Image: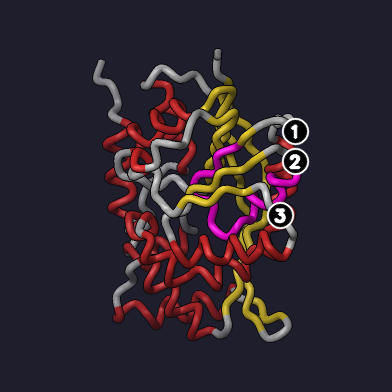
Amino acid sequence: MCAINWGEMWRIMLLDTYRTEICKPSYWDKHANEFNENMAYMSDLTKSQLDKLLLLPEYTVLDVGAGTGRLTIPLAKRVKQVIVLEPSKNMLELLKANAEKGNIKNIHYINSSLEDLQAYNYVSLCDVVIASFSLFMVDIEKALLTIDSLAKKGVYIFLSASKWMTEELQKIIYGDTVFIWPDYIYIYNILHNLGILANVDIWDYTSTKSYGSIDDAVSKFMELYHISAEKEGKLREYLRRILVKDNGKFLLSRKMKVAMIWWTKNE
C-alpha cells in the first residue's frame, strides 16, 4: 500500500491556489487596514472560538499569526499573559493600537514569523499555543512541530473546513472545478503522521467581508486568486450577483464551516 504524502499535497495545494502569497508579511502589510475593519463582521466566529478554548486565568498563551488582535484582545482578558507572534509590521501596529483602546496591558509583542522565532530565544514554553487561520507555511510539518514544542498544556488550531473558494469561482479561474480538500483535512493527517493524535470539532459560521466598491472587490479578487485580465469580465459579473450593498459598503457573505484541531500535552 502506498502511503499518502500529506505534506507534499499541502505544498501543491498552496501553490495551485496561489496561497503562498498570503504567507508573506508584505501581503498583510498592504491589507492590514481592511483586515482590521473586517473584524467587526467576525464577532460571532470570535465568540464561538473563545467558547471552545479551555483556558485558566494563570495561563500564558502564544497567539501565532495574531493579525490585528481579533482573538488576542479577548484572550488577554481571560489569561495572565498573551504573547503575540505577527510577521506583518502594519498588522502588529494596529494590534497595539486596538489593545491600547481597550486598556489591555498584558500582551507581549513579537514582530516575527514562526519560522524565525528561534531568534527570540527568550520565548520559553507557553501553557497554550493558538493559531487561528494563520498556518500557510509551505513546510507545514516543521511549523506544526515547532508549535507543539512551544506548548506545555495544549494546542488549538483553527482552520477552514470548507473549500478555499466556491465552485463557481473555481470555474471562472480554472475553467473547471478542481478537487482540493478543505484545509483541516491536510493538517489533521499531517499531525497523525507526525505522531500527534488530535481532536477535531467542526461548526458553522458566516464569513463576511466588505469592499468599498465593485471595482475594489474585483481588484482584490484578481490579486488574491491571480486571475488573468481576460477573465475580469466574468469575475465582475459574478461579484455583481453575490455582493450586497449595505451602508455604502459591498458585503460578501458565505456560509462556511470552521474546524478546531486541538490536542493536550503530557507535561
Residue 73 lies in magenta, yes or no? yes
Earlier in the chain: of badge 2 and badge 3, it is 2
**Amino acid type of disc 2?**
Arg
Q: Is residue 240 above or below residue 113?
A: below
Marks 1 and 2, how far apart at CA:
6 Å
Residue occupying the point 43% across, 34% down = 187
Q: Dividing the picture into quarters, in which one does residue 55 lie?
A: top right
Marks 1 and 3, how far apart at CA:
15 Å
Image coords of residue 8 (percent x, y): 27, 36
Residue farthest along the front direction in this orientation:
122
Residue closest to the eye, 77 or 40 = 77
Residue closest to the eye, 41 or 129 = 129
Residue occupying the point 43% across, 72% down = 30
Badge 1 vs badge 3, beta-carbon distance below 8 Å: no
Q: Which residue is mark 3?
A: 104
Secondary structure beneath label 2: loop
Disc 3 packing (10 Å; few <14; some 14–19; many ≥20): some
Badge 2 vs badge 3, beta-carbon distance below 8 Å: no
Q: Dividing the picture into quarters, in which one does residue 120 lie?
A: top left
Q: Which residue is mark 2?
A: 78
Q: Quadrant of the C terminus?
A: top right
Q: Which residue is mark 1?
A: 57
Q: Quadrant of the N terminus?
A: top left
Residue 240 lies in magenta, yes or no? no
Q: Is residue 99 above or below residue 250?
A: above
Badge 1 vs badge 2, beta-carbon distance below 8 Å: yes
Q: Which residues are magenta?
A: 61-78
Left or right side of 140 for 59: right
